[in-house]
Amino acid sequence: MLTEIIIIGNELISGRKRDLNAWYASGCLLSHGLEVSEITTVGDNYDTLSSVLRAAVKRSNFIIAAGGLGPTEDDLTTEIASKALDRPLSLDQTVLDHIKDNTKKLGPSWSPSLEKMARLPRGARILDPKGEMCGFSLSEGDSVLYFLPGVPEQMRELMNRFVIPDILQRYTPANIPQHRIFKVYGLSESYIAETFKDLSDELKRVRYGFYPSFPENHITITVQGKKHEEIEREFNRAEEKIRNLLGPYIFASDDKSMEAIVGGLLKERKLTISVAESCTGGLIGHRLTSISGSSLYFERGLIVYSDQSKVEMLGVKQKTIDSYGAVSDQTVREMAEGIKKTAKTDMGLAVTGIAGPLGGTENKPVGTVFIGLSVDGEIFSGQYRFSGERDKVKLNTSEMALDWVRRYLNGYPFIPGI
């Protein structure tokens, strides 16, 4: 049973907009045991899209096309599908009435161009009966085509509520795959792939995927089977081997983030933390407080960007900055101790560095970062050299700093610096 995806839009093939719909649709289909055989991205062009649709109907049982269903002149998908499949357009009065009702609710005045969305190919079936989102399906020979809006939120809603249930009514997969994601920080994708080279022979029913999600790397494992017990057994075997291979570099599984893991550990151990940030400009505090319930463990965060703020707000000695610089091991240690004392928390975390593109020197180039952690009467510090543009340096610094907290609380060694 073949399934394919067609993503439509000039903004996508020009690179002006990033495609999220193919990624979501393929993951959604795969999670229900439906393998995607082909993904095509095409512009709003009659000849090209017509050719793609006709070819898809000949080779695939289910076709999901997203994009080009709006009211503007460049939204041509419905018209092109009508001509390519020889299905004349006709006005669907029910759809038109829904569009008018929704327009009144939203406030804008009625525009004749909106009528375009109510003109559908012959035999089209509306996906959303309430008419809140445009989208329709067509049966063509042995194929079913689903035409969805390009707006990601609407596309996902229709995929979940209408498309997947409709496909599963027509076809029951023999094996349902289950997936698990392991999130890794501190190892390169090439290192992970090399480490996993021999694992495929040991676990033949398990499929692996390696996906960078800066600054992390995500490992996906997929197991197909008919019985839940068999799948769970394979998952457990695979997980044990993966954890033995990568150890503490794995910080989470599935949808958990680094900040959620750190927050969970702090909450579980009834510990509090405060943060002093220079080069990250509040990013660490933002990540920690993005987790619901973070008030139980996050006491405060200070953005101490200038030398003066480090002295006045944290008690960093001016002599330290004059002798070693604001970006130094000595300064970050005093920052970590200063924020811990000022906030009266169990842990004090501090970062200082050069995010770039300006400010680097021969001894301390752009990407040089120092991290400090004050806890249990000790102060730990380390130096790192992160590559990439400013945003990447800041994100990597925040990830490493949070990883320090995670590793300390779990009794793991810190990732070595330079």
Image: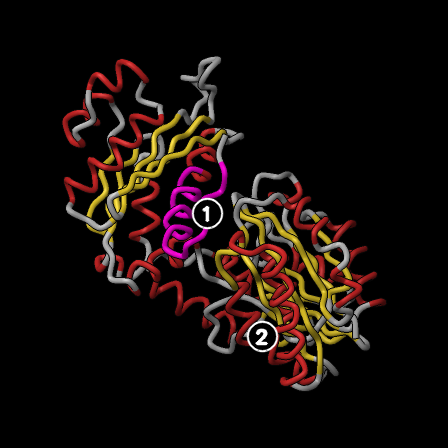
Q: Nearer the viewer, residue 255 or 80?
A: 255
**Residues shaded magenta:** 397-416
**Quarter assignment of residue 290:** bottom left
Dot label at residue 6: none
Q: Residue at x 37, y 56 (%)?
A: 109
Q: Which of the image's four quarters has the N terminus?
A: bottom right
The vertical placement of 305 against 205, above or below, is above
Displayed quadrant of residue 342: top left
Residue 52 spot, x, y in % from top left: 78, 56
Please state the horizontal and vertical placement of residue 165, each as a whole percent of the image. Answer: 60, 80
Q: Would you say 65 lies left or right of 323 here? A: right
User: Is any part of residue 118 visible from this angle?
Assistant: yes
- 10 Å crowding of disc 2: few (<14), some (14-19), many (20+): many
Dot 2 or dot 1: first in sequence order is: 2
Residue 136 placement (x, y as % from top left): 61, 70
Residue at 81 percent of width and 76 percent of height: 141
The residue indicated by pointer 2 is 126
| Residue 67 appears in the figure | no
Mark 2 belongs to which amino acid? Ile
**Residue closest to the eye, 51 or 220:** 220
User: How has the structure been colored for display?
Assistant: secondary structure
**Residue found at x 62% / y 76%:** 125
Q: Residues within 10 Å of mark 1 (few under 14, many from 20)?
A: few
User: Which residue does the numbered mark 1 point to in the structure image?
Assistant: 413
SS assignment at label 2: strand
